[in-house]
Image (cartoon, helix red, strand yellow):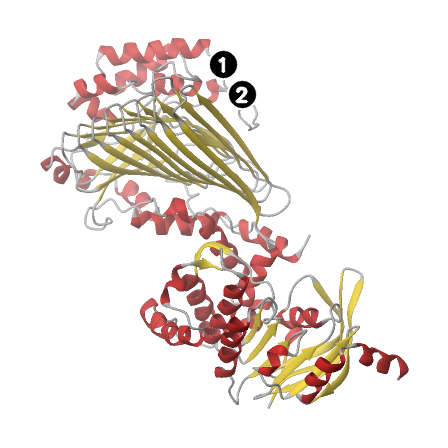
């Protein structure tokens, strides 16, 4: 089943074009890695998929589970199972993780026509998910990301993902700023959530994360276009050779 | 304008749901104020001579005073004090003996406001005094309270039934000549609530007063006096609403609290007077003097306020920390939206030794609202070991609102410790987007962010009202974010 189909996507921020014709198909059960140098448009692609208002789509189409994604509000996308693990998770002082995450889960359940989950059942659900990120229950009474270290914020994103069980998860540079232990925890969390009926897009600058989360497909972005796609071995090649040679290939092509 | 701002805008503009008018026959005196009006009000309430004299002194002093128009960070056209109705009371055929005798129309009004006056339907454990325009129309649970010796009644009744207590404490914290609005109130106050908790008694239920302005062009000038005798404890809450009208209405109340040795008074306010329309037409002018005196050692007075209504709010609930080791607290959430203006804060006056005060103020500005925190911490020479902690946070929603902080710190004792922290934040597009990406719509996202911002204050409210306050905040910010 096709989870996501991007056709000739162009997007800009202000007057500056960033995405210049991206096409990509992601099927259910697959993990895709989007790689590329800084400024190639990786994070912009993630933000456009989530519907960030700062980016304007000027051309192209995105189909998500057959629906016109660009026609949906950010919260409708989330309710339909699209999840973005943020590169820079935001702090919400005074709002506990438990309150926030239950509210989010209930919005998604409501959209699916399910009943709201009560606080007791919710805590049971969370208990199992906390194990994935090797956390105790005390994290649930802390305010959302407030005073969290960089690594804790990323782990919190994975916890949210585990609780919300998205159909399509987009991890935006989740590995940046993580030490090796945090990286292992984050990756094993993501792996545990892989299922035949969901899909994951991993946006990363480094090959390192892909040692833990093994992708089915790797795409390299440069100047807002996918310049090369391949299997997981492409990531290793990039690690060995850097991104330069690809730019030359693009130029000579 | 960014898309998140326009959704804030659309959020703030929900209808004020308490804006209806009760159609009831009222006894209204002609507009305007002179000595005869003061005498008339006093006569209607069959007051003793000393009280009339006190009112007249206040009135004469008021004539010499000037409206405080210059220091507060608010602007409004001059108030014509001769165009206000100073007394309006729903007509009753006979004096009210019990709830059964209250006009059904009034009962329906309070029902509609979510304050059913029948004791069975009330929040368990909350006694209510309902004030309609100038008079108290009902007080619930009086008998239950009387069993533990607690007096909870309207001010008029207190003047009749407990004249010694009233005479002893009335004006003892806010003198008749304290300020322009307090002097006006002292001259014309019509009703209000009176509470006396005797020595060693912990008041068995929450007390609350519900203020409702109904008559057009009537001012509301209520006067509340709460006395907690030695070792007594009481928690009191007031709520306020008014119909929507095109003209501004004046509310100039005075609240006095007296805490004797070892006593604790907790006073909470959820103020939701009509705020005027989006262009700033109509709304209540809320010019209120609230002050508590920790008269005895080891006493404590705590103010918690959630201010979401009124066109203009001008109030500074204060504590005079006279007893040694006494404690003063002020927790405040003030929200301005549309064209609302608020200049509010507190005064903590440290007189006794080892006195402590805590001030937590959360100001939220949206729309074209203008919000000022004005707070004074004064430590007198004998207040050795006094401590104050002030935290003052402002949140801005959108680009056309304002937030200001005016702290005044005056320390005359070298052993005192005074801390002041202030912050200003703008509700971030990134915060809203983050919550939307988790499935919340803009309205719920803002409500969550704002409630988180106010959490330190909400946790000070009595349980039943904390939930109400959260909802109220959601409503008053509706349409504020774009």
Q: Is residue B416 above or below residue B12?
A: above
Q: Image height check: is B362 above or below B170?
A: below
Q: What whole-number distance in Å separates the C-alpha atoms at marks 1 and 2?
A: 8 Å
Please state the horizontal and vertical placement of residue B147, each as a whole percent of the image. Answer: 9, 37
Tell me: residue B331, above or below residue A189: above
Q: Neighbour class for label 2 at 10 Å: few (<14), some, many (≥20)?
A: few
| Residue B481 can be seen, yes or no | yes
Q: Is residue B439 left or right of residue B226?
A: right
Residue that mark 2 sits on: B69
In screen coordinates, is A207 left or right of B432?
right
| Chain letter belonging to callout 1 | B
Chain letter of disc 2 in the image: B
Residue A167 location, x and y as percent? Answer: 54, 81
Q: Name, please, the residue furthest toward the left.
A: B147
Crowd rating for badge 1 (residues with CA inside 10 Å; few <14, some 14–19, many 20+): few
The residue closer to the viewer here, A89 or A117, is: A89
Q: Residue at x 34, y 73 (%)?
A: A124
Q: Quadrant of the N terminus of chain A?
A: bottom right
**Secondary structure under the numbered disc 2 in the rendered image:** loop
In front of the other: B237 or A98: A98
Q: Quadrant of residue B27?
A: top left
User: Could you confirm whether marks 1 and 2 are on the same chain?
Assistant: yes
Q: Name the residue: 51% across, 87% down.
A: A195
> How far across and how far down the image is residue A14, in percent?
76, 60
Q: Is residue B469 left or right of residue A42?
A: left
Residue at mark 1: B66
**Residue A18 at what x, y percent from top left?**
77, 68
Q: Are marks 1 and 2 in contact (CB under 8 Å)?
A: yes
């Amino acid at each position: 089943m096709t989870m996501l189909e991007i056709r000739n996507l162009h997007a800009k921020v202000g007057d500056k074009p960033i995405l210049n014709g991206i096409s990509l198909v992601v099927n259910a059960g697959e993990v895709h890695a989007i790689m590329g140098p800084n400024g190639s448009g990786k994070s912009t692609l993630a933000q456009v998929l989530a519907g960030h208002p700062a980016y304007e789509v000027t051309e192209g189409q995105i189909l998500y589970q057959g629906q016109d994604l660009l026609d949906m509000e950010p919260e409708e996308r989330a309710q339909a199972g699209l999840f973005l693990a943020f590169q820079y998770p935001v702090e919400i002082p005074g709002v506990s993780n438990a309150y926030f995450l239950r509210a989010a889960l209930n919005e998604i359940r409501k959209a699916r026509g399910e009943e709201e989950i009560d606080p007791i059942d919710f805590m049971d659900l969370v208990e199992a998910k906390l194990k994935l990120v090797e956390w105790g229950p005390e994290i649930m009474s802390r305010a959302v990301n407030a005073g969290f270290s960089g690594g804790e914020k990323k782990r919190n994103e994975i916890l949210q993902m585990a609780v919300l069980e998205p159909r399509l998860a987009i991890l935006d540079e989740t590995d940046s700023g993580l030490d090796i232990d945090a990286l292992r925890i984050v990756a094993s969390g993501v792996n545990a959530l892989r299922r035949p009926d969901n899909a994951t897009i991993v946006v990363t600058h480094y090959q390192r994360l892909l040692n833990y989360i093994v992708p089915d497909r790797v795409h390299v972005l440069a100047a807002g276009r996918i310049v090369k796609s391949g299997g997981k071995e492409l990531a290793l090649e990039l690690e060995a050779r850097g991104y330069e040679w690809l730019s030359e290939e693009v130029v000579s092509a | 304008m960014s898309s998140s701002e326009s959704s804030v805008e659309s959020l703030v503009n929900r209808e004020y749901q308490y804006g209806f008018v009760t159609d009831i026959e009222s006894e209204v005196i002609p507009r305007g104020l002179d000595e005869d009006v003061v005498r008339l009000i006093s006569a209607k309430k069959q007051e003793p001579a000393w009280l009339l004299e006190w009112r007249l002194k206040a009135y004469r002093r008021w004539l010499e005073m000037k409206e405080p128009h210059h220091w507060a960070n608010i602007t409004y056209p001059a108030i014509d004090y001769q165009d206000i109705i100073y007394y309006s009371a729903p007509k009753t055929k006979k004096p009210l003996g019990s709830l059964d005798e209250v006009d059904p129309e009034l009962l329906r009004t309070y029902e509609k406001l979510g304050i059913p006056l029948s004791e069975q339907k009330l929040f368990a454990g909350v006694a209510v005094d309902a004030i309609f325009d100038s008079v108290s129309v009902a007080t619930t649970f009086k008998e239950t309270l009387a069993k533990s010796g607690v007096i909870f009644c309207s001010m008029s009744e207190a003047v009749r039934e407990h004249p010694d207590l009233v005479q002893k404490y009335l004006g003892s914290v806010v003198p008749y000549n304290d300020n322009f609005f307090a002097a006006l109130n002292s001259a014309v106050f019509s009703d209000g609530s009176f509470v006396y908790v005797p020595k060693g008694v912990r008041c068995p239920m929450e007390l609350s007063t519900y203020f409702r302005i109904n008559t057009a062009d009537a001012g509301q000038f209520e006067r509340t006096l709460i006395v907690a005798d030695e070792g007594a404890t009481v928690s009191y809450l007031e709520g306020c609403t008014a119909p929507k009208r095109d003209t501004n209405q004046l509310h100039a109340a005075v609240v006095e609290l007296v805490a004797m040795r070892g006593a604790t008074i907790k006073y909470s306010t959820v103020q939701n007077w009509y705020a005027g329309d989006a262009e700033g037409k109509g709304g209540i002018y809320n010019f209120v003097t609230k002050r508590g005196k920790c008269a005895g050692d080891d006493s404590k007075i705590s103010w918690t306020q959630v201010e979401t209504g009124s066109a203009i709010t001008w109030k500074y609930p204060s504590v005079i920390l006279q007893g040694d080791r006494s404690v003063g607290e002020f927790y405040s959430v003030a929200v301005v939206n549309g064209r609302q203006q608020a200049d509010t804060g507190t005064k903590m006056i440290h007189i006794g030794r080892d006195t402590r005060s805590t001030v937590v103020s959360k100001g939220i500005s949206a729309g074209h609202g203008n919000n000022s925190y004005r707070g004074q911490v004064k430590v007198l020479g004998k207040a050795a070991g006094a401590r104050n902690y002030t935290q003052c946070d402002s949140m801005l929603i959108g680009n056309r609102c304002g937030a200001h902080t005016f702290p005044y710190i005056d320390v005359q004792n070298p052993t005192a410790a005074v801390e002041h922290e202030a912050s200003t934040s703008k509700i971030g597009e990134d915060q809203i987007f983050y919550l939307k990406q988790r499935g919340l719509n803009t309205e719920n996202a803002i409500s969550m962010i704002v409630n988180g911002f106010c959490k330190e204050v909400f946790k000070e409210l009595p349980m039943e009202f904390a939930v109400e306050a959260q909802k109220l905040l959601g409503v008053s910010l509706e349409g504020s974010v774009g």
